[in-house]
Image (cartoon, rainbow, N blue to C red):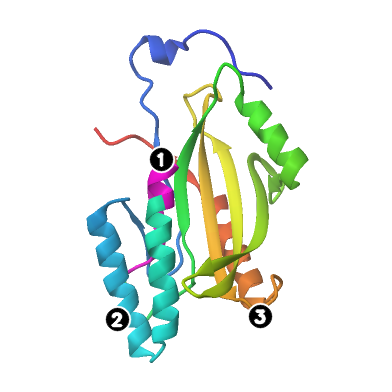
Amino acid sequence: MSIGAGPTLREQLGLSAEPDFEIDLPAGWERRDVSDEDRASLVAALRKKFLSVQRPDLYAVAQSLVDGSYSAMRSAGAVAYYAATTGDEHTLWIPGSIVVSTRTATPEISMDQMVSHAIREFGAQPLFGDKRFIRFERDETVTVGESSIGLTTVEYLTPIPTTRRRRALQFTATVARPAEAEADDEQVVASKRLYDACISSLRWVAPSS
């Protein structure tokens, strides 16, 4: 598969606006913007939740992750993110989030080359056998304040319709765990399965007018 040359008929007619997107979400999760106001709102919700269960230690970790995540999201050109933010009794709380950004092919690196690199370097594979998505993950230990935590990151890449494989959405899902917990911890594995199910539900919708 290669990137075609020249504009499509859709582009020539001025109808090349990229579609918006939706995914199924866990209870209490919602799509949010990447803004200072949004960050403050999320931190307040996390503080209320973790202090209500007498876990200020987890709140401190979560706040640091949120601050770092917003900085990273802006640097990476994120367009949206998903997280547990409603704070009601039905919310499924996971120490992580799903960040959505875009990847753009260049004259030097095509989308197919990006995919090949992910397969070669990270062992990327189709999500549930669906070749519209590639999926790969990595695990690392990161320092938060004066302590360390384990962090599992799952990356998903899928081309955006109407862009002739020039642009793709990248979903970056994370789940944190105590440093002493293993990467195959039951909670981590369950979170990864949930993320897989969410991303596989991707639906393209008409862009807002």
How many other residues sit within 10 Å of disc 3, few (<14), some (14-19) or many (≥20)?
few
x 52%, y 43%: residue: 170
> Mark 1 and mark 2: span between their CA atoms?
29 Å
How many other residues sit within 10 Å of disc 1, few (<14), some (14-19) or many (≥20)?
few
Q: At label 1, which amino acid type do we have? A: Gly
Q: Which residue matches tag 1?
A: 77
154 sits to left or right of 163: right
Of circles 3 and 2, the one toward us is: 3
Number of marks in picture: 3
Quadrant including the N terminus:
top right
Quadrant including the C terminus:
top left
In which quadrant of the rendered view does residue 57 lie?
A: bottom left
Among numbered discs 1 and 3, the one appearing first in the sequence = 1
The relative height of residue 43 versus residue 100 in the rendered view (above or below) is below
**Image: magenta residue range:** 72-85
Element assignment for label 2: helix
How many other residues sit within 10 Å of disc 2, few (<14), some (14-19) or many (≥20)?
some
x 66%, y 27%: residue: 112
Residue 113: image x %, image y %?
Answer: 67, 27
* Residue 79 in sight from this viewpoint: no
The relative height of residue 174 versus residue 5 in the rendered view (above or below) is below
Judge whether residue 128 is colored magenta.
no
The relative height of residue 151 versus residue 58 in the rendered view (above or below) is above
> Mark 3 and mark 2: span between their CA atoms?
26 Å
Residue 109: image x %, image y %?
Answer: 61, 23
Q: Which residue matches tag 3?
A: 180
Among numbered discs 3 and 2, the one appearing first in the sequence = 2
Q: Which residue matches tag 2?
A: 48
